[in-house]
Amino acid sequence: MTLYTQQENNVARTWVLMGTFLALVIALGWFFGRIYGEPLILYLAIILSLAMNVVGYWFADKIVLRLAGARPAGRQEFFDLYTVTENLAITAGLPLPCLFVIDDPSPNAFATGRDKNHAVVAVTTGLLGRLERAELEGVIAHELSHIGNRDILLATVVVVLVGFVSILSDIFLRSRLGVSSGSGDGNRRGGNVLVLVGLVLAILSPLAATLIQLAISRRREYLADASGALLTRYPEGLARALEKISQSPKPLRRVSAATAHLYLSDPTGGAKKFFSLFATHPPLADRIRLLREMS
C-alpha cells in the first residue's frame, strides 16, 4: 500500500465511520423508543447523530485541545519548536500547523484537526525539556506525517463519536428499564426481548466503537513512524525519542480514554493490559526496532 492509497483510504474510512455512527445511534434510538414506548426518542436520536457528525467534523479539534489542557505556543517562548516545525513542514510541502503546548512533565505529543489547512500539533513541556533537537525533529516529523497521511480527521472524529456512543450507552444502562406490562404474557415476553436486545446493544456499542478506535490508532502509528523517518532521513532520531519516552512511563495528568489514541505514545503510562487488542498503541519496543531496521 502506498502513502497515496493510505490517504485515500483514510478519507473513505472517515465517511464510513460517520455513516456507521449515524446508523448505530438511530438503531439505539429505535430500541430505546420501543422499550420506553416513546417514538420521540427515535427522532431525537436522528437529530443528535446528525448534530454529532457535524460537531465531530468542524469542532472536534477544539474539544481535543480543551480535554488535553493545551494552550497556544508563543514563538519567542518556544522558538526551537517553531523552527523545527517550520523546516519540516516546508520539506513535507505542508502549511505550518498551529502549535500548542501542554504543561505536563510527561513527554508526549499529538496532531489533530480536519485537514492540512486546519491542523494542530501539540507537545508537552516534558517532551520539549527532555529531547535533543534531532529527537524533537523525529517527533514533529511523525506528527506532520499524520497530517500529510490524512490521519487527523479520522482520528479526531473518532474522539467525538466514540465518546457520544459511550455516553448514550451509559445513560441507558443507568436508567430504569421500565417496560409496559401489557395485557398478557405475549406482550410481557415481547417487552422482555426488547429489553434484552437493548441491553446487549448498549453494552456492545461502545465496545465496538472502542475497538475501531484502537485498530485505527495502531495501524496509523506504524505508518507515521515510517513516513516521519523518510521525512527527516534520520530514523534514529525518532527511535531515540521513543526510547526516552519509554523510560518515563508517568501518565499525563489529564488523560481521557476518548483522546488516548491521538498521542505519540500511550498517555496512560503504558499500563499493561490483559489483551493487546485493547492497547491504544503498538509496543514501543517494536516501533523502535522497526525504525532502527530502517537505519
Image (cartoon, helix red, strand yellow):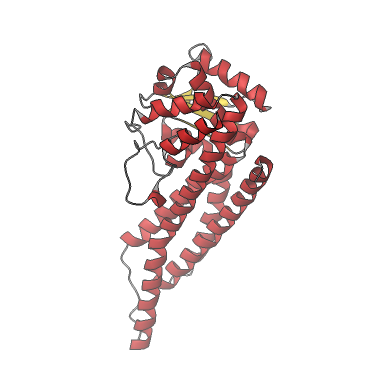
Asked if one can make out residue 57 in the rendered structure from this viewpoint, the answer is yes
Could you say which is closer to the camera, residue 185 or residue 210? 210
* Left or right, 185 with reference to 28: left
> Where residue 84 sits in the image (x, y, percent)?
56, 18
Q: Is residue 288 above or below residue 277?
A: above
Report which quarter residue 102 is drawn in.
top left
> Where residue 78 sits in the image (x, y, percent)?
49, 15
Quadrant that contains the C terminus? top right
* Left or right, 151 with reference to 162: right
Looking at the image, which residue is at 42% across and 23% down? 127
> Where residue 222 sits in the image (x, y, percent)?
52, 40
* Left or right, 245 with reference to 30: left
In the rendered image, the residue lying farthest to the top is 76
Q: Is residue 39 above or below residue 80?
A: below
Q: Is residue 282 above or below residue 134?
A: below
> Where residue 234 sits in the image (x, y, percent)?
56, 24
Report which quarter residue 98 is drawn in.
top right
Looking at the image, which residue is at 42% across and 33% down? 68
Looking at the image, which residue is at 54% across and 34% down? 225
